[in-house]
Amino acid sequence: MNNFIGLVPAYNEGKTIYSVAANSKKHLDIIMVVDDGSTDNTRKEAENAGAIVLAHCKNLGKGVALKRGFDYILKNFPDLEGIIILDGDGQHDPDEIPKFIETFENAGADLILGQRIINRNQMLFLRRIGNSFISWIISRKINQKISDSQSGFRLLSRRFLENLDLKSTGYGIETEILVKAAKNKFQIKTIPISTIYLNKKHISFAKDFRMAASVLKELVSR
């Protein structure tokens, strides 16, 4: 079908991972799920959807999950052109995968970010403000306008991946990828994507705080 592989880091996403993996396979031959120590049926549901699954015995962090996926794919798929990352919670629409591939083929960018179309009535105010503030800081650091720096829906070219030495273990990895792409003169492009908003009662402010802390720590350390 094409030489791109879908990579989905997942932690306790048993309710959504089957749909994410199965719908992604409509556009990609291979989907890999890294089950980061889930205590639910994430692994089983991902396997039922036809995904390759790498599983951690305990939760090690999104950064560790992504790095393990990157390493495995680079070693085992020599014809790979790039990796498309999606979150496992169902907030990304797999039917938008072709947009990333088309942008890669037309522009040759090494890092393509999905910029979420923000619905002000659906995204909570504090989350919207936090995302905008972090994106503003990152834009200043890399000297390029990035409106949605924390979007997990992105494409990374093989050329970029082979030159990417990542240190982050948690949520800061997405910021580290951006900063290192800019620092090493890899081309960054953004494309608009829709966002499937989950029920607000499922939003974890503790998770949001940890994510913001990881991002800020990453920015200070680089």
Image (spheres, helix red, strand yellow):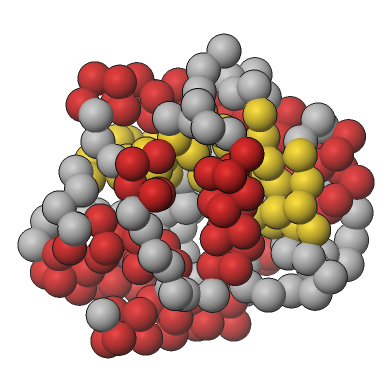
Number of numbered callouts drawn: 0
List x then y, in percent, for residue 72: 63, 49
The N terminus appears in which quarter of the rendering?
top right
Nearest to the observer: residue 181 or residue 98:
181
* Residue drawn 25% across the image and 65% down it: 179
Q: In the image, is residue 200 above or below residue 161? A: below
List x then y, in percent, for residue 149: 32, 59
Q: Residue furthest left?
A: 143
Q: In the image, is residue 25 above or below residue 85? A: above
The C terminus appears in which quarter of the rendering?
bottom left
* Residue drawn 54% across the image and 74% down it: 170
Nearest to the observer: residue 133 or residue 31:
31
Q: Is residue 148 left or right of residue 88?
A: left
List x then y, in percent, for residue 206: 59, 82
The answer to whether residue 100 shows anywhere in this view is yes
The answer to whether residue 205 shows anywhere in this view is no
List x then y, in percent, for residue 29: 64, 22
Q: In the image, is residue 162 above or below residue 57? A: above
Residue 90 occupies quadrant:
top right
Residue 32 occupies quadrant:
top right
* Residue drawn 23% across the image and 40% down it: 189
* Residue drawn 33% across the image and 47% down it: 160
Q: Is residue 211 left or right of residue 49?
A: left
Q: Is residue 208 left or right of residue 183?
A: right
